[in-house]
Image (spheres, helix red, strand yellow):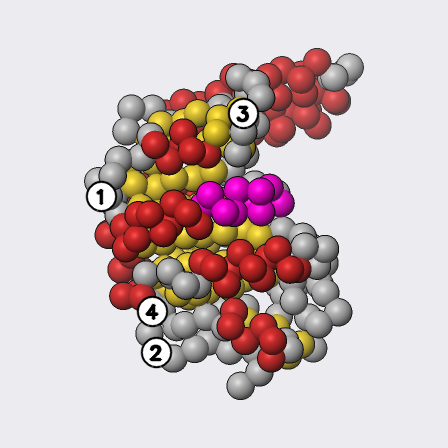
Amino acid sequence: MVKTLPETLNFLCPFQSDLIRIGNSGDGGYLVPAKSVAEVDHLLSIGISDDWTFEVEIAKANSAISIDGYDRTSGTLVFLYYALRELRVVRSFRGLMKGASKIRRWIRLAISFKFFWNRRHRFTRRWVVLASNSTKEIELSKVFKRIPENVNLAIKIDIEGNEYKLGKQIISEVKRRGSDVCLIIFEFHDTIRLRDEFLEFVKELTQHLKIVHLHGNNFGQIAADGFPEVIEITFASEAFAFEQKTLAFPHNLDIPCNPSLPDVAFCFAG
């Protein structure tokens, strides 16, 4: 059954756009305006983990783009460590056969990571925070300073709930760069427990960019009013948004983040 969201959430209703899917077929793929891809000069991607298919595909679609990636849990040596850890727990030939696919996966990730994140596309193995307390962290202000001025900037952030801590500084940078920020992809978490923080953050962003897509992540729960606990939101410049709104979700290009469960369905009051 499709749940109709309360009218108080109508400001989240996206504008229609010429959307395409960039990234893999599950959690890690996002819908963005097709025309925006060629406009982006620089992509800031915070939160990589073991899936950078979005970064790979946008780089293929726009060969001029440069990418900065940040995540403490990613890296060639990290993935090789995971492969060795799988190997260490093997106690028999049967165990080796069972663990072989995991070992191969980590080795493949290590190799592909090494080839993609070099030269033009820069990766920093640190957590992005407001105030750094160790060498494992880097301050968001420093991250933004590393991005050239007067470039068309896209931002992708998936940091498992820590996005709210960075919210004010992100808004400040969007204001400062103005129309140079043409695309933002956010995965918001904890929208049930942190509903007020979520709504405040999104309302501020929509003063500068238009919402052009929503997708509920079906790994999360659903609130009593039908809104997903975890939701992916694509914000884009007004130039990429049409006048009409999209009322019902999921979009036909959306794919469930968890393939074993149905996608999250909801609609806005017309």
Q: CA distance from mark 2 to mark 4?
A: 7 Å
Question: In this image, 216 relative to 147: left or right?
Answer: right
- Look at the numbered discs 3 and 1 and tell me whether their residues touch, using CB distance below 8 Å: no
Three-letter residue code for mark 4? Ala
Highlighted magenta segment, given as a residue range: 161-170
Residues at marks 4 and 1, CA–CA distance in whole angstroms: 22 Å
Q: Circle 4: is it few (<14), some (14-19), or many (20+) Cα within 10 Å?
A: many
Q: Secondary structure at mark 4?
A: loop
Residue 160 in view here: yes
Residue found at the very far bottom of the displayed protein: 270
Q: CA distance from mark 2 to mark 1?
A: 28 Å
Instruction: Pick the quarter of the image with the N terminus.
Output: bottom right
> Which amino acid is tagged 1?
Asn
**How many angstroms separate mark 3 from mark 4 (CA)?**
37 Å
Out of 22 and 96, give the one closest to the viewer.
Answer: 22
Image disc number at residue 241: 4
Q: Nearer the viewer, residue 154 or 111?
A: 154
**In front of the other: label 3 or label 2?**
3
Give the class, few, some or many, for how many residues have Cα within 10 Å of label 2's Cα (few <14, many ≥20): few
* Horizontal side of residue 169 vs 95, given as left or right: left
Q: Give the foreground label among 4 and 1.
A: 1
Q: Nearer the viewer, mark 3 or mark 4?
A: 3
**Structural distance between the alpha carbons of marks 3 and 1:** 27 Å
User: Residue 73 at x, y = what percent?
Assistant: 57, 27
Q: Is residue 161 above or below residue 144?
A: below
Q: Which structural element holds mark 3?
A: loop
**Tag 3: residue type?**
Ser
